[in-house]
């Protein structure tokens, strides 16, 4: 507890490990409704992964999320948290073990920021000292000044600060699973981008299992380790990793939902080293001149030399393409972290990557 | 409560009008006489406390009943409408008729007055408590449930604190209104400032002092409740950045 870095592993937490989550043939039909809101939904989220539920409005993504902590009761199937059915748990106990953050945030206006963050630890009966230490730790985690913010009321915070406090409150008891329902939905695009990046950084540190609901496919692709696309009526259209979703949409609905620019989205998800580079000889009649350490010096053709543009192996293809377009070159020399030649990138390779079936088409 | 015989005795003699000893033409003319008021203010003390007693007890009992009804109606929404209608009917019965209807049952005295005055507060208090609970932001409620509050915890730790400003507003209206209505408690034989005023209703000084004390009591109760509200809801004044 004295060291914030190890608190996660030993001190404040009652559930230090991330949990696995499994939907098993889950269905939900609201009373008085003839059509189900969720139909036969099955998927598994490995511990520590971010699973994004995405789909058009009315597809049941929020309902699906609320079934997990029994804010809505399922009518069929089962949901297993670390292999244990949520049906066997008392709802209040279950919910105290699951972080809960919603779009409207729902901070308590009559409590200070510190009291808001301490909500679940207080419900769990933690000691004063433990709560105080945990709250300070969370202020640090979400990048707000504890001494300045502690005594403020929610009405005295900006939208972005409120959102951070909402996330801190959801994380307070260090739950093994977090549910987040469009937490950035009401935030302007610039701040949304920042909060998304913060969440990714945070997640790299805390490694929770997260179920994240959004209607924004770009947000889903950016944040998700896995994405579940739902159709109207709560039918699972596809459950896959983002790259797979972009490369192999299961049906026309997914293809349409993912969008016409899905090809470009794929380019930002793929590293240069992963797309089947050519050997530099393929650039003939251009010849690559290298130094003794195999670092590129220049292109040579008929005795004339041209600048050789280099691309790092770990860059995303989208950035590489952008650089190539800007430099008006046909080839990019791909180099490793030491600057040594490791392959050749051409427009033709990128084209083939985007349109796998279009073999032999000239770039 | 037991001041009734005392006040009746007062109204039987003329001597008390002029305890100051002066032969005052102002008093003879039933006028507004500051000097008389200064010398006779003590006779209003006991009726004042009796009046306050009637108000505080009636509002307190009324609040207890309205609070219980509102909590029941909060869980069973369909009860809101019938409870509003019944308390609404109670509210429209003229207080005088209420006293006269109750007299044969409960007799003359504070009990009769308190029953009628309590009935009067129910509509205002019930409506304000229900409105206050309804005004709790749905997202606070959802977040509270989602974090594992039980229904009871949610009520006491989230919903009622957030409903407090509206509930206190209701209490302030009820207290102020009841101060005025309690002036009629004299017809139930329950004493109070109304008794004092009725004892010499043609004497302007007397009526003016009684009336002024009622106003003072109403303003004082309102101020106390307002202060309590401010102390209990520091968050309500927190400004948006």
Image: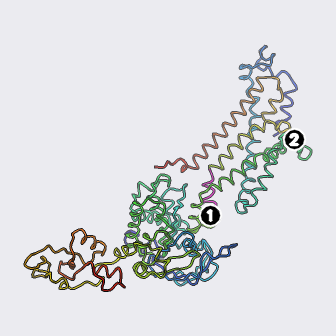
In the shown orientation, is residue A48 left or right of residue A327? right
Is residue A14 in sight in this rendering? no
Which residue corresponds to the image point at 58% horizontal and 46% vertical from the top-left?
Answer: B230
Q: Nearer the viewer, mark 2 or mark 1?
A: 2
In the shown orientation, is residue A360 left or right of residue A305? right
> Which residue is outermost to the left?
A303
Answer whether residue A278 is magenta in the image.
Answer: no
Residue B138 drawn at (x, y percent): 60, 60
Circle 2 residues within 10 Å: few <14, some 14–19, many ≥20: few
**Chain under label 2?**
B
Q: Is residue B54 above or below residue A96?
A: above
Q: Specify the quadrant of the image occupied by residue A59.
A: bottom right
> Which residue is outermost to the right?
B104
Q: Mark 1: which secondary structure?
A: helix
Q: Is residue B132 above or below residue A20?
A: above
Which residue corresponds to the image point at 19% horizontal and 73% vertical from the top-left?
Answer: A309
Q: Is residue B206 above or below residue A63?
A: above
Which residue corresponds to the image point at 35% horizontal and 79% vertical from the top-left?
Answer: A354
Is residue B59 in sight in this rendering? yes
Residue stretch in magenta: B151-164
Label 2 to label 1: alpha-carbon separation: 43 Å
Q: How many marks?
A: 2
Q: What residue does disc 2 label?
A: B97
In the shown orientation, is residue A245 left or right of residue A82? left
In the shown orientation, is residue B59 left or right of residue A71? right
Prevailing secondary structure of the magenta residues? helix
Q: Specify the quadrant of the image occupied by residue A140.
A: bottom left
Circle 1 residues within 10 Å: few <14, some 14–19, many ≥20: some
Q: What residue does disc 1 label?
A: B153
């Amino acid at each position: 507890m004295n060291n914030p870095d190890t608190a996660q592993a030993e001190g404040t937490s009652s559930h230090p490990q991330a949990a696995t989550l499994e939907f098993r043939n889950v269905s939900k039909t609201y009373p008085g409704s003839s059509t189900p809101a969720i139909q036969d939904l099955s998927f598994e989220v490995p511990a520590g992964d971010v699973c994004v539920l995405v789909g058009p409005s009315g597809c049941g993504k929020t309902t699906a999320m609320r079934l997990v902590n029994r804010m809505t009761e399922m009518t069929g199937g089962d949901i297993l948290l670390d292999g244990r059915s949520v049906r066997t748990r008392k709802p209040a106990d279950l919910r105290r073990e699951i972080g809960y953050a919603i779009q409207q945030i729902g901070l308590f206006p009559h409590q200070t920021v510190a009291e808001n963050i301490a909500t679940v630890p207080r419900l769990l009966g933690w000691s004063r000292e433990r709560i105080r230490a945990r709250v300070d730790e969370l202020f640090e985690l979400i990048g707000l000044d504890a001494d300045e913010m502690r005594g403020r009321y929610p009405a005295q915070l900006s939208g972005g600060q409120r959102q951070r406090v909402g996330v801190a409150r959801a994380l307070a008891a260090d739950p093994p699973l977090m549910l987040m329902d469009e937490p950035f939905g009401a935030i302007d695009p610039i701040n949304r981008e920042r909060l998304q990046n913060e969440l990714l950084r945070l997640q790299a540190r805390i490694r929770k299992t997260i179920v994240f609901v959004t209607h924004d496919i770009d947000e889903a692709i950016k944040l998700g380790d896995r994405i579940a696309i739902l159709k109207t009526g709560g039918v699972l259209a596809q459950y896959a990793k983002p790259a797979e979703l972009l490369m192999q949409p299961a049906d026309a609905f997914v293809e349409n939902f993912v969008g016409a620019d899905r090809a470009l989205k794929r380019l930002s998800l793929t590293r240069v080293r992963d797309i089947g580079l050519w050997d530099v000889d393929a650039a003939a009649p251009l010849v690559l001149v290298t130094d003794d350490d195999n670092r590129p010096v220049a292109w040579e053709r008929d005795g004339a030399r041209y600048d050789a543009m280099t691309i790092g192996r770990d860059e995303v293809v989208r950035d590489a393409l952008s650089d190539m377009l800007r430099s008006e070159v046909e080839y990019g020399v791909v180099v490793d972290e030491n600057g040594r030649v490791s392959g050749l990138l051409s427009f033709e390779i990128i084209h083939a990557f985007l349109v796998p079936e279009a073999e032999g088409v000239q770039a | 409560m037991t001041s009734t015989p005392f006040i009746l005795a007062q109204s039987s003699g003329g001597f008390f009008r002029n305890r100051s000893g002066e032969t005052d033409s102002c008093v003879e003319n039933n006028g507004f006489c500051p000097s008389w008021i200064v010398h006779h203010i003590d006779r209003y003390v006991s009726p004042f406390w009796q009046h306050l007693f009637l108000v505080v007890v009636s509002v307190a009992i009324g609040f207890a009943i309205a609070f219980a009804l509102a909590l029941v109606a909060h869980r069973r929404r369909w009860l809101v409408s019938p409870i509003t209608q019944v308390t609404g009917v109670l509210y429209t019965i003229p207080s005088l008729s209420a006293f006269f209807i109750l007299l044969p049952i409960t007799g003359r005295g504070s009990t009769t007055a308190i029953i009628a005055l309590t009935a009067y507060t129910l509509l205002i208090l019930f409506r304000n408590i229900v409105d206050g609970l309804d005004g709790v932001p749905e997202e606070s409620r959802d977040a509270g449930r989602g974090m594992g509050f039980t229904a009871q915890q949610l009520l006491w730790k989230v919903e009622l604190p957030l409903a407090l400003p509206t509930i206190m507003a209701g209490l302030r209206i009820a207290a102020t209104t009841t101060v005025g209505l309690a002036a009629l408690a004299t017809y139930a034989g329950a004493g109070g400032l109304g008794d004092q005023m009725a004892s010499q209703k043609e004497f302007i000084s007397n009526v003016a002092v009684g009336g002024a004390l009622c106003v003072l009591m109403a303003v004082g109760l309102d101020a106390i409740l307002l202060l309590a509200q401010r102390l209990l809801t520091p968050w309500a004044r927190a400004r948006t950045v």
